Image (cartoon, rainbow, N blue to C red):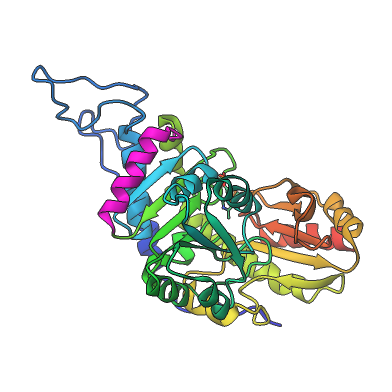
Amino acid sequence: MNPTQPPTAPSPSAFATRCVHAAQQPDPATGAIVAPMHLSTTFERDADGGYPRGWRYGREGTPNRSALEACVAELEGGVAAFAFSSGLAANMAVLELLGPGDRIVAAREGYHGTHRQLEEIVRRRGVAVEFIDATDARQIERALDARTKLLWVETPANPLLSITDLARAADLAHAVGARVVCDSTFATPYCQRPFEFGVDLVIHSGTKYFGGHSDILSGLVIVRDDPELAARLAEWQSLAGAVLAPFDCWLLRRSITTLGLRMQRQCANALELAGWLDAHAAIERTLYPGLAGHPGHALALRQMPGGFGAVISICVHGDAARALGVAARTELFRRATSLGGVESLIEHRASVEGPGTLTPGNLLRLSIGIEDPRDLRADLARALA
Ligand SMILES: Cc1ncc(COP(=O)(O)O)c(C=O)c1O
């Protein structure tokens, strides 16, 4: 199978321009081009008791958080964004919309931490949780009912990179009055813009591509167009308190400056490596939506106009020990969990997920970085030999 070039990339220059300039102005007080960092947790009241500058207390909002959230809302095309101290804290803000007697339908394939939240926190609250294969619209349709408040999908999904049809999922959910949440961490708005397909809420682990350097734990929730929902999330963010600190907001906004550039390079590296891995004799299957043989390829061509992302899973011939042996021999690919950083990582996913995992033991997940693809290929060739 040959990797297919993505179709018309969504004017990457426009995206790259927004990454640099969205919600970013020279500082009015000093003219500084780089936004200053405001560490203060409290803000002065006027003599009349008002807060004319808009900020009162750090948990409720800070200048750096507002700037970051405005930038993320613009990149994703929503009306409001909320920054949290991790991706899972962002998930919890959305899962708070569910109460006893409600129901959530969620994709079976997805980040295992999200599944644990659903099983160990949400279900205990008296919420019915049903897992389905979200690549099968009939399963979604059968699972949705009048009690269903949320349909939760992740696309591309962990760890098989399956692709969910967002437009179809949104139509089905809206027909029963449910909202659709898409964890778009693997794609970022460079590759895919879920709101254009009718999705109501987008989630990102900002720890991954938005941060891009494996040094900021963060989560983002973006609301497409519902001000009431945005107000509820703002209230939750302030009251639950798992907010992103000013330094992390500043650093994340700085990282976003290069998001377009990094994604362009990482997606191109991944597409090239996936084609080569797919033809390698030591590999049983290569899972990457950019490959013509991937079950979600046709859909990805429509839904991910910017590229197919930079995560590739490979199943090596043999068992878990053989996969761990391959990971043990890489030098440039660092053995570590996570993804989205500038450095390439390799991980044996089943042993990270632990007992009960559905991930095949012979699967290795590769997060492709910005290195020279020839070096990455040579490193994998050595490890697979
Ligand atoms: C797709 C996806 N969503 C959410 C998360 C959770 O993010 P965090 O680790 O920032 O809490 C992860 C973490 O790996 C992830 O891969």
Residue 228, magenta (yes or no) = yes
Where is residue 53, by image quadrant? top left
Q: Position of residue 230 (x, y in %)?
A: 31, 50
Residue 241, magenta (yes or no) = yes
Where is residue 309, by image quadrant? bottom right
> Relative to 188, does residue 28 appear above or below in the rendering?
above
Q: Which residues are magenta?
A: 226-244
Q: Position of residue 214 (x, y in %)?
A: 59, 42
Q: Tell me which residue sits at (17%, 27%) in the image.
A: 51
Q: Position of residue 359 (x, y in %)?
A: 75, 61
Q: In the rendered view, does 159 fall on the left or right side of 299?
A: right
Q: In the rendered view, does 3 fall on the left or right side of 357?
A: left
Q: Position of residue 90 (x, y in %)?
A: 47, 45
Residue 333 visible in the displayed image = no
Q: Tell me which residue sits at (58%, 66%) in the image.
A: 156
Magenta residues, dominant SS class? helix
Decide which of 21, 121 is in the foreground and name it. Answer: 121
> Relative to 293, does residue 102 appear above or below in the rendering?
above
> Relative to 193, does residue 254 appear above or below in the rendering?
above
Q: Tell me which residue sits at (33%, 39%) in the image.
A: 235
